Amino acid sequence: GTTPAMLAVEGLVVGYSGAPVIDGMQLRLPPGQVVALLGANGAGKTTLLRTVSGLVAPRSGRVRLDGEDVTQTTVEDRARRGLAQVPEGHSIVTELTVDENLHLGGLWRLPGTKARRAAVDEMYQTFEPLARRRASLGHQLSGGERQMLALARALIARPRVLLLDEPSLGLAPRVVAQLFAILRDAAERTGLTVLLAEQNVTSALSIADRGVVVSLGAIVADAPAEKIAADPALRHAYLGF
Ligand code: ATP
């Protein structure tokens, strides 16, 4: 197509030692779109996210950020171009406070202590539970608070593209709803493009514009979120319910 994609993978083939785990994948995300990446355990969701962020090098194919081919670039370079990732199991520093974790998140993209302070305070307005916990150490937080901190830390750098790997894992439904509402809101307010890998199909589709289902490293369905949600055969075959 000719519509501009904020994030694209083209003919992507990724493998570890044996057969490819991702085999010739094509995906284009227009700016501001929230895409739920769905599929059973081992379908290749994590591998796709790690290839997009630069942690894994593909055997062939391309990754493009805002049209630019970044396939050969480093994780840091992609972060500088506006790509942020919340990996599985979050990524906060448990020995630092909430406030310190947030400052770290803004270190690269926000020059100067004043700009970072302002950005951190802005995050506290969005993530109210974090404001109450600003002086707490990472390891003192609940699972939900940790995931919230991981998301806030990624958003503080004002990314253009955000990758999330199973942010709902182990969280109570109420906390998941709160987290996803913030994500949806960030996408709407800032035009953030989101690729959200989730096992929690219903919650993910409820905030996504579009659902992409992967099985054995290939895309088997790609449709508006409400269409995926309403397709019992698809859910039964690939999503386990
Ligand atoms: P999960 O929800 O379990 O993370 P997933 O859809 O994210 O599943 P991947 O983690 O990408 O799937 O795994 C896809 C396949 O690649 C699996 O067969 C897995 O065993 C294999 N795999 C993943 N990481 C590695 C690795 N570091 N070395 C070798 N094989 C791997």
Image (cartoon, rainbow, N blue to C red):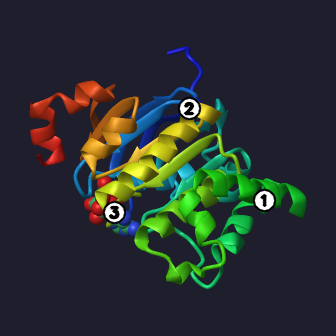
Q: Is residue 197 above or below residue 168?
A: above
Q: CA distance from mark 1 to mark 3?
A: 28 Å
Q: Could you say which is closer to the camera, residue 217 or residue 58?
A: 217
Query: Does residue 113 appear to the left or right of 69 in the view shown?
Result: right
Mark positioned earlier in the residue sequence (3 or 2): 3
Q: Give the distance between the C-alpha atoms of the residues marked 3 and 2, in whole angstroms.
A: 24 Å
Q: Where does residue 206 sit, x and y in percent of width and height?
A: 33, 37
Callout 2 touching callout 1 (CB < 8 Å): no
Sequence-wise first label, 2 or 1: 1
Does 112 sit above or below residue 71?
A: below
Dot placed on the residue nearer the N-terminal end, 1 or 3: 1
Q: Which residue is mark 3?
A: 169
Residue assigned mark 2: 188
Using the rendered view, name the quadrant where residue 187 is placed.
Answer: top right
Q: Is residue 167 left or right of residue 103?
A: left
Q: Which residue does the image show at 49% across and 56% down from the upper left?
A: 50
User: Mark 1 or 3, which is nearer the eye?
Assistant: 3
